[in-house]
Amino acid sequence: MQAQPAMALLAVLWVASMGTAVAATPLQVAYAGSMGAVMDLHLGPAFAKAHHVTYQGEGQGAYGLAHLIAAKKLRTDVFISITPGPIRVLEKAGMVNKAIPVASTAMVIAYSPKSRYAKDFAAAAAGKLPWYTVLEKPGIQFGRTDPQTDPQGQNIIFTFLLAQKYYHQPELVQRILGPVENQGQIFTEASLLARLKSGQMDASSGYESAVKSLHLPSIPLPDEINLSNPAMAKAWYDTVHFTMQVDGKTQTLHTQPLVFYAAVPKDAPHPKLGEAFIRFMTSKAGQAVFRETGYNPPKGGDLS
């Protein structure tokens, strides 16, 4: 239990060395919804305290946020996305020049300790039975986010498509997920986690980082299906795809690396403050915060 105070102290010491900003200036950060705990409880407050600014965080599906920023309906000092896709939306709109990788993660299956199948999920997590067989038990409520607005909603579909091949289980996607936009399974990130904690939902898609941050139990997945290993991208991950209607047009979607990228939009209210926050996230202290809250180191280079 002593890791968190030490982590917070390290973060404060680092940002204190970077100087201060004008009092009461708000640092505005729009981030992928799964990052709520690390942003709002750790990184944001630590940076704000040392810089004598206020911190304002907003977490939603990264694609949804990117479209709001591109349409100039949302102004923020920093935008943090999971996967390059939402960053490309802003690049296309001429809103960012580059984005920097700050952390990475992997897909997992999160489950509720209050589920009537909790013992089965725990056995699957220990490798004692196939995880997908638990998800096919009678009455299981499985949740995921909207693939239209959230990369995680797309990534869980890729995970199941890869699982079909890896485990030689034809129709696994249809048996457990149903159609791409199965409204009976789709919830916001915050609603998914709340339902898991309360026991209203048995299991859901999840990023390892978010699940660990919230101390929820989960089933780890092999690299072959968790989308975490860039070395497997061309030979394996890229062998699956699916189509979806986007703005009235059929789009074919492909896997993307589960890397978190940070960028300062061109219309940021406080661009220098945004740049300082990104430097903090990539510093030794910032990386310690990410590590202690369940995130993996950043992978790959800048997006530009």
Image (cartoon, rainbow, N blue to C red):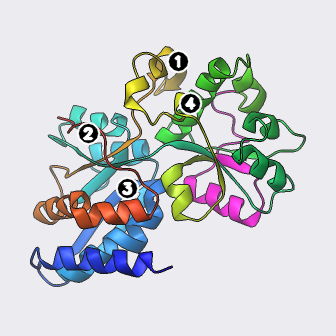
Where in the figure is residue 80, as x and y percent of width and height? 32, 51
How busy is the neighbourhood of tag 4: few (under 14 within 10 Å), some, or many (20 plus)?
many
Q: Are marks 4 and 3 in contact (CB under 8 Å)?
A: no
Identify residue type, mark 1.
Val
Per the model, the C-alpha gap separating discs 4 and 3 is 25 Å
Residue at 13 percent across and 60 percent down: it is 271
Per the model, the C-alpha gap separating discs 1 and 2 is 26 Å
Q: Which residue is mark 4?
A: 225
Q: Secondary structure at mark 4?
A: helix
- Which residue range is magenta in the image? 179-204
Identify residue type, mark 4.
Ile
How busy is the neighbourhood of tag 3: few (under 14 within 10 Å), some, or many (20 plus)?
many
Question: Depth-wise, is mark 3 or mark 2 nearer the camera?
Answer: 3
Disc on the earlier residue, 4 or 3? 3
Where in the figure is residue 53, as x and y percent of width and height? 22, 79
Q: Which residue is mark 1?
A: 240
Q: Is residue 44 above or below residue 103?
A: below
Residue at 23 percent across and 31 percent down: it is 92
Q: Secondary structure at mark 3?
A: strand
Q: Which residue is mark 3?
A: 31
Residue 188 part of the magenta segment: yes
Question: Depth-wise, is mark 1 or mark 2 nearer the camera?
Answer: 1
Residue at 14 percent across and 40 percent down: it is 97
Q: Nearer the viewer, residue 196 or 145?
A: 196
Disc on the earlier residue, 1 or 2? 2
Q: Secondary structure at mark 2?
A: helix
